[in-house]
Image (cartoon, grey):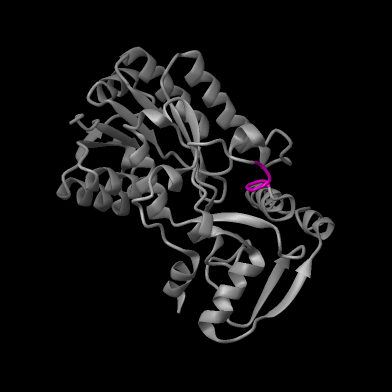
Amino acid sequence: MIDKSKVLVVGGTGYLGKRIVKASLAGGHLTYVLHRPEIGIDVEKVQTLLSFKAGGAHLVEASLDDHRRLVEAVKKVDVVVSAISGVHLRSHHILLQLKLVQAIKDAGNIKRFLPSEFGMDPSRMAHALEPGNETFVQKMIVRKAIEDAGIPFTYVSANCFAGYFVGGLCQMGTVTPSRESVLLLGDGNVPAVFVDEDDIAAYTIKMIDDPRTLNKTIYIRPPENILSQRQVVGLWEKLIKKELHKSSISGEDFLASMKGLDYAQQAGLGHFYHIFYEGCLTNFDIGGGEEASELYPEINYVRIEEYLKRYL
């Protein structure tokens, strides 16, 4: 039996990071969580860290700006998973990973690095609208640094986090479903891919010791969760036994609505445009052996109707 890798999670107190920590522990991995000494009086993060410790995780204090201590932290493990935030509406620190890449290179012991991606595949988004293209440009900078350093990697493309997209019926600016009305993006028929955040974490941890995922981009595209906005709305209507009032916005009007908004809102709307008007998540075929639910059929992923039941 192959020993399970020791895992260091960077960004472990964040929205996805805390789920990755829990999935790593549940998977029987010796799990380390990096935390910054400058955490200060962020009591919520401290309590999260303490809950990890109670669950068997090892807490490692190191700043991304302290290269020596960062290298020491990396040397404790076999695999590094980064969940540093790249969502403009929360915080955006993708390029901080370049310091992590340098530490991994200098440590010289890491068998696999999974950088913070987890959304759209940045290699397919060279055409992305400004300012939202910044996310993809920066992720590609990190990829180049990883590959130039000769670090083994897996890139995880997890598509749409259900909490951000399903809860709001694929509308930006809300994360809970209305029982009255919905704004359809275009005709509402462009398919997207929605994944429960705990499932993203579970698939990610499955990948870290799998030779089939080494030096590849792996897509989390569960077949039953490939749905259009209209289909998501239809599932919600079925659950509440009521038809919502529907209006729609054309692609041209959607883009026009971005003018005058702040940077984060413009970036988010641009991503919504690519997903729900262009179909950027589903307009290409995945190569064999590169889709997570196919690789790990033992994971019974959450279907979107089940996810929506949480809001009843």
Q: Position of residue 55 (x, y in %)?
A: 17, 49
The C terminus, quarter of image: bottom left
Q: Residue furthest front?
A: 288
Residue 282 is a magenta residue: yes
Q: Residue furthest right?
A: 252
Residue 148 visible, this angle: yes
Residue shown at 52%/67% (left/top)?
167
Q: Residue furthest bottom?
A: 241
Is residue 153 left or right of 221 when viewed as pictured? left
Q: Is residue 194 above or below residue 135?
A: below
The N terminus, quarter of image: top left
Q: Position of residue 76 (x, y in %)?
A: 22, 24
Q: Nearer the viewer, residue 292 or 101?
A: 292
Q: Nearer the viewer, residue 161 or 94?
A: 161
Residue 32 is a magenta residue: no
Is residue 124 left or right of 115 when viewed as pictured? right
Residue shown at 45%/32% (left/top)?
115
Is residue 169 left or right of 162 when viewed as pictured? right
Quadrant of the rendered structure where residue 184 is?
bottom right
Q: How many marks?
A: 0
Q: Position of residue 106 (x, y in %)?
A: 35, 13
Quadrant of the rendered structure where residue 141 is?
top right
The segment highlighted magenta reads: 280-284
Is residue 2 left or right of 144 when viewed as pictured? left
Q: Is residue 214 above or below residue 162?
A: above
Predominant SS along the magenta part:
loop
Q: Is residue 65 above or below residue 253?
A: above
Residue 15 visible, this angle: no
